[in-house]
Amino acid sequence: MRKVYFDHAATTPVDPAVAELVMKYTTEHFGNPSSIHNFGREVKKAVEHAREQVVKAIGASHVGEIAFCSGGTEAANMAIRGAAYANKQKGNHIITTAVEHHCVLSTCEQLAKEGFEVTVLPVDQYGRVSVEDVRNALTDKTILVSIMHANNEVGTIMPIAEIGKMLKSQDRKIIFHTDAVQSIGKLPVNVDDLNVDILTFSGHKIYGPKGIGAMYLRRGTWWQPIMYGGGQERRRRPGTENAPGIIGLGKAVEIAVENREEYAEKLTKLREKLVDRVLNSIPNVKLNGHPTECIPGHASFCFEFIEGESMLLSLDMLGIAISSGSACTSGSLEPSHVLLAMGIPKEIAHGSLRVSMGKYNTEEDVDYFVDNLIPIIERLRKMSPLAGSASCTPCACASCDENKK
Ligand SMILES: Cc1ncc(COP(=O)(O)O)c(C=O)c1O
């Protein structure tokens, strides 16, 4: 059976060049980078090389601005909690959006329980927050704004550079964090162009290892650690470093950024073909997220009258791996918070599918997916009690008509 992996927003296969390095620094060069003997020193050197690779990839100015940690979730916790507590004397107000990953939303919810005031901004029908809404939400107590670069469910790109510029023009310093887990390697990510103070990302979304991530912290940004222990990572993240992971992440980010334009061009074409075929061959389907301001290779749909899980399982039986929402929320019967925030009614949000293609996918994969999806949708709709009346709800009709223009 053909196997098609269309779930790169959940995780990616490790690039062979990365895997080779990880293996080497797991078996051959296994020293603790804090040890002063040769076993430790050679690993330390490779860890510092990885830090330089990250600096170069995101346009940072100094290796001291990069701290490695266990992944995108920990990095976001470090970014938000660390900035919130370090700046508590100046204010207690934090701004974020309704479509963030749970690592940001739940961290902000927890801070609200700890006495911070959190504003969760709405988004438009495509999942974008407006610069004006961010500006209007600012108060003289605002210390931090945390907004993702690209959404993990619908792929929509946020106006990060514009928001950063607006925040910079304020009289007082407001720290700006962006979660770039889904954008790095797919979009240009340069911390100066994006006007951000803190940027976080993860290894396993860019063909690197799982359980490794990084936080960029602009020099001069007030921040404090959230964990205490040894002096590793300039006291920003204590604990013996995951050296193979760090070294693998360095290589992965280097490959991802060096080849970004080539991958983006290929994935944009694959997405166009897939979206075109799905919208033109299946009735009552809505494309979620922004039609053009979207990460390459990413497409999210809502199919009326059916459950995302039933589509996912039917496709899985044919060797096609896909997600019915974000990896963290699939398995839960609650519809995606992102789709609901975009104004999609609950019953339609239940029928969502997320396709996220990667650098190894081909046009044949797209054809295999769509050729199999069409009969699956037909079969599931025949079985669906919701499809009995077979008339579109007003919302979905408006959307699918719009999509087909
Ligand atoms: C936008 C976004 N942020 C953060 C994370 C968490 O990253 P990690 O899995 O490395 O903890 C994810 C993972 O899906 C994500 O998509």
Image (cartoon, rainbow, N blue to C red):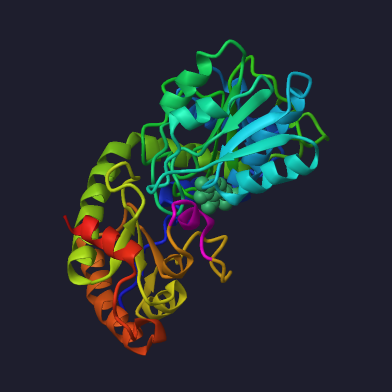
Q: Is residue 30 visible?
A: yes
Furthest toward the bottom, the residue is 383
Q: Quadrant of residue 79?
A: top right
Q: Quadrant of residue 95?
A: top right
Q: Is residue 236 visible?
A: no
Residue 24 image offset from top left, x and y in percent: 55, 47
Q: Quadrant of residue 352?
A: bottom left
For the residue pair 303 and 136, the one nearer the viewer reads as 136
Q: How many numbered discs sit on the rendered protein?
A: 0
Left or right: residue 389 versus residue 52 is: left
Residue 78's place in the image compared with 263, above or below, is above
Residue 346 image offset from top left, x and y in percent: 48, 66
Query: What residue is at 26 percent from the left and 54 percent from the top?
Result: 271
Residue 311 image offset from top left, x and y in percent: 39, 76
Residue 347's place in the image compared with 296, above or below, is below
Magenta span includes 342 = yes
Which range is magenta? 335-343
Query: What residue is at 51 percent from the left and 47 percent from the top?
Result: 99
